[in-house]
Image (cartoon, rainbow, N blue to C red):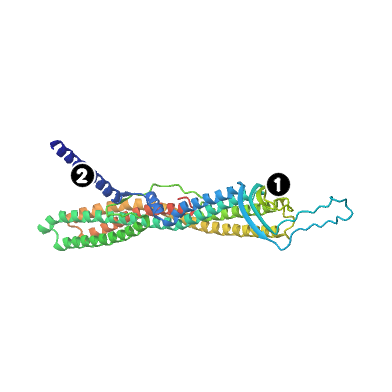
């Protein structure tokens, strides 16, 4: 009994341990990420985008279709059973007059009711390349479907880029507000003794307190804006984000002019599909060679005049060639060539549109690069001004309004610097998206 009790206790402990481990994994599995990059956002969104899941289904459909095309060169076997009744049959009458006695004879007459059981085998030997081109067409159609799904996700990618950098800009603004609030709180504490000693009036402290409250208001407003972007990003990625989620600033990137947009790939694939269809039309004009075999058992057999059941077989080869099609293939080729010309016009128009976007972004990149250089100089000057104004405030030669004004100017310069850096980076990522390289 004691041994049994110990075993039971051990099993209970193991059970509770297993439940705890499963529960722990479940919690961590469901917990939101505490650090996030723009690349991981894109990956989450891809996994969460329903249309992209169709790519897997399209691949499976195409694989099955290709197997069907391959079966064109497998032997095809058909079984056929047939029974028929006819009103007349072959009747061969021979005039036997003048023949010696006993030499008279008659031809047998086939039955009016006839039966046949046949097994037919056909083998495609050469089809002019039709099967090969059908496979290629199916693969190109698969590529088109998947590219169209990728194009659908392209808009989501642009949206994520806007949201991600929007959050970063708001977070930088929030950081500057926190820093300014700390600076005002520190300055307020430093002035308390001066107010108590009568060196400064109470309105100086009140002005600092009012501006601290204004900063708190701004903080709440910005945080709510961030939360709104969090909710939108959660819908796109399928992940929940908390207030303390750290959004990493993307690394600097080199821009490239290569146009890899899905729209261009779609147009190129359409051109390839058109060329393959032209080759298919050519193949349809080529001769087709096949072999066949027929095995049967019927009444009558191959000897039609015998009224008896007999087995038989037939083997052979056949050649099929459409010699004249009234220029049908020629006109179809012309149609496909005209469609190709139309696609080339679409490509030219689209490339012009992309060039307009990239030229605009290049100007933006140049603009923010120059602004950042000036931001650094402006910040250094504001630091000196703010330091000197703080000294004067402490000595009572300026009031709080003057100090707050210089502090706000320094805060604004810092915010502008951080925002300009993020906007420069965003322009580079916009450039990659515009050219399809992100």
In the rendered image, which quarter is residue 12 located in? top left
Quadrant in which the N terminus is drawn: top left
Left or right of 68 in this view: 123 = right
In the rendered image, which quarter is residue 201 located in? bottom left
Left or right of 426 in this view: 170 = left
Which residue position is annotated with label 1? 316
Per the rendering, the mark at residue 16 is: 2
Left or right of 354 in this view: 305 = right
Left or right of 77 in this view: 217 = left
Q: Are marks 1 and 2 in contact (CB under 8 Å)?
A: no
Report x, y in % for residue 202: 14, 62
Report x, y in % for residue 397: 19, 57
Along the line of sight, which residue is nearer the eye, 430 or 329? 329
In this view, the mark in front (1 or 2)? 1
Q: Residues within 10 Å of mark 2 (few under 14, many from 20)?
A: few
Along the line of sight, which residue is nearer the eye, 140 or 385? 140
What is the C-alpha distance between the residues marked 1 and 2? 76 Å
Report x, y in % for residue 272: 60, 52
Along the line of sight, which residue is nearer the eye, 247 or 69? 69
Give whichever of discs 1 and 2 has the lower sequence position. 2
Report x, y in % for residue 364: 44, 56
Asked if residue 335 is positioned above or below residue 100 in the image, the reply reads below
Q: Is residue 258 visible?
A: no
């Amino acid at each position: 009994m004691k041994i049994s009790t110990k075993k039971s206790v051990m099993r209970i402990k193991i059970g509770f341990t297993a439940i705890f481990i499963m529960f722990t994994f479940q919690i961590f599995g469901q917990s939101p990420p505490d650090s996030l990059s723009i690349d991981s956002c894109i990956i989450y969104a891809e996994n969460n985008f329903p249309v992209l899941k169709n790519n897997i289904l399209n691949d499976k459909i195409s694989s099955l279709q290709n197997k069907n095309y391959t079966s064109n060169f497998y032997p095809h076997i058909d079984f056929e059973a047939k029974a028929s009744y006819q009103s007349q049959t072959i009747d061969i009458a021979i005039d036997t007059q003048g023949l010696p006695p006993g030499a008279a004879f008659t031809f047998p007459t086939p039955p009016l009711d006839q039966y046949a059981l046949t097994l037919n085998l056909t083998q495609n030997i050469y089809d002019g390349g039709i099967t090969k081109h059908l496979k290629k067409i199916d693969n190109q159609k698969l590529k088109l479907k998947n590219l169209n799904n990728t194009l659908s996700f392209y808009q989501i990618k642009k949206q994520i880029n806007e949201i991600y950098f929007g959050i970063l800009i708001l977070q930088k603004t929030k950081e500057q507000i926190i820093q300014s609030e700390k600076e005002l709180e520190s300055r307020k504490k430093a002035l308390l003794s001066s107010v108590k000693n009568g060196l400064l009036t109470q309105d100086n402290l009140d002005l600092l307190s009012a501006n601290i409250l204004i900063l708190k208001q701004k903080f709440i407003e910005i945080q709510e804006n961030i939360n709104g972007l969090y909710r939108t990003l959660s819908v796109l990625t399928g992940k929940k984000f908390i207030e303390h989620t750290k959004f990493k600033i993307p690394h600097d990137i080199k821009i490239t002019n290569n146009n890899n947009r899905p729209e261009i790939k779609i147009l190129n694939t359409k051109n390839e599909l058109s060329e393959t269809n032209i080759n298919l039309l050519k193949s349809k004009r080529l001769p087709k060679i096949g072999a066949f075999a027929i095995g049967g058992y019927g009444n009558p057999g191959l000897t039609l005049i015998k009224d008896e059941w007999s087995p038989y077989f037939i083997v052979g080869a056949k050649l099929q060639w459409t010699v004249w099609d009234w220029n049908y293939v020629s006109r179809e080729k012309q149609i496909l060539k005209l469609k190709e010309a139309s696609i080339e016009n679409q490509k030219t128009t689209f490339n012009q549109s992309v060039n307009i976007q990239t030229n605009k972004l290049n100007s933006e990149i140049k603009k923010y690069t120059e602004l950042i250089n000036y931001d650094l100089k402006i910040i250094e000057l504001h630091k000196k001004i703010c330091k000197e104004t703080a000294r004067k405030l402490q000595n009572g030669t300026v009031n709080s309004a003057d100090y707050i004004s210089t502090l706000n100017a320094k805060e604004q310069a810092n915010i502008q610097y951080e925002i300009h850096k993020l906007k420069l980076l965003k322009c580079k990522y916009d450039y990659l998206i515009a050219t399809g390289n992100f």
